[in-house]
Image (tube, coloured by chain):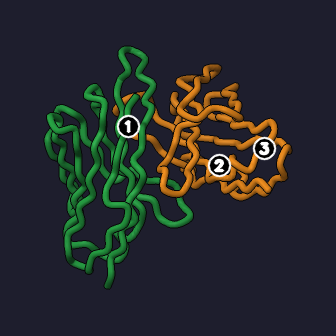
Chain colours: A green, B orange
Amino acid sequence: GENVEQHPSTLSVQEGDSAVIKCTYSDSASNYFPWYKQELGKGPQLIIDIRSNVGEKKDQRIAVTLNKTAKHFSLHITETQPEDSAVYFCAASNPEGSSNTGKLIFGQGTTLQVKP
Amino acid sequence: NAGVTQTPKFRVLKTGQSMTLLCAQDMNHEYMYWYRQDPGMGLRLIHYSVGEGTTAKGEVPDGYNVSRLKKQNFLLGLESAAPSQTSVYFCASSYYGVGQPQHFGDGTRLSIL
């Protein structure tokens, strides 16, 4: 089955710097890759996603890149702010033939700390 | 719009006790999921449902049962709680399957003594 590895497990940056989180996946059939942000005591919240027919997607200070050949995808946050501090999860999903269950396989999470 | 609501938010059980976690969504989503979150392991899928009256096993289904009698509700049951089931449980829902964003509740923190 699918396996998703996420690095680093912790990341500390100065306010205004960029942060990059990387994930690799094992199943070449995976075609949907969302990123979630989880604040303390809350559930994960989708911040950006990308499909396998797209190489890059941007939304203001957040961008995601996908390399299907290497089977890895990355989250880029520019001009980081203290409110970006949270745990970030990557995930992968594949259609599993015609079953279309939508099951997500998550990475282990990255704790991002943005220092003022 | 409440989104996904989980009940209760916290619970402490003794080994061997049973309980049911309730998930309710008001977005008319077809698909619903139960995950558990443990330190350093991300979120792992316990069970899921692709529509009212259907359920299926995820990655870690042992020790849990689920029911989806109404489209808006997805129940997770622990028949005989074990300390290994101490975790934070999250429910999520989506309109359909692959490629559809999953919306999460704020979790149930469960401790088994």
The residue that disc 3 covers is: B81
Q: Mark 3: give few (<14), some (14-19) or many (20+) Cα within 10 Å.
A: many
Q: Within the image, what quadrant is residue A103 found in?
A: top left
Tell whether label 1 touches label 3 (CB within 8 Å): no
- Residue under disc 3 on the same chain as residue under disc 2: yes
Q: Mark 2: give few (<14), some (14-19) or many (20+) Cα within 10 Å.
A: many
Left or right of residue B97: residue A11: left
The residue that disc 2 covers is: B6
Residue type for callout 1: Asn
The residue that disc 1 covers is: A3
Residue B53: image location, x then y, percent: 64, 20
Q: Chain of mark 1?
A: A
* SS category of the residue bearing label 1: loop
Instruction: Determine whether A12 is above or below B102 in the image.
Output: below
Residue B97: image location, x then y, percent: 42, 28
Q: Chain of mark 3?
A: B
Q: Mark 1: give few (<14), some (14-19) or many (20+) Cα within 10 Å.
A: few
Tell whether label 2 touches label 3 (CB within 8 Å): no
Q: Within the image, what quadrant is residue A38 found in?
A: bottom left
Spatial CA span between label 3 and label 2: 19 Å
For the residue pair B24 and A42, the one nearer the viewer reads as A42
> What residue is at 39 percent from the left and 47 percent from the top?
A107
Left or right of residue B77: residue A34: left
Q: Chain of mark 2?
A: B
Residue type for callout 3: Ala
Spatial CA span between label 1 and label 2: 28 Å
> What residue is at 64 percent from the left and 52 percent from the top?
B87
Residue A46: image location, x then y, percent: 38, 50
Tell whether label 2 touches label 1 (CB within 8 Å): no
* SS category of the residue bearing label 2: strand
Instruction: Determine whether A100 is above or below B90 in the image.
Output: above
Label 1 vs label 2, nearer the camera: 1
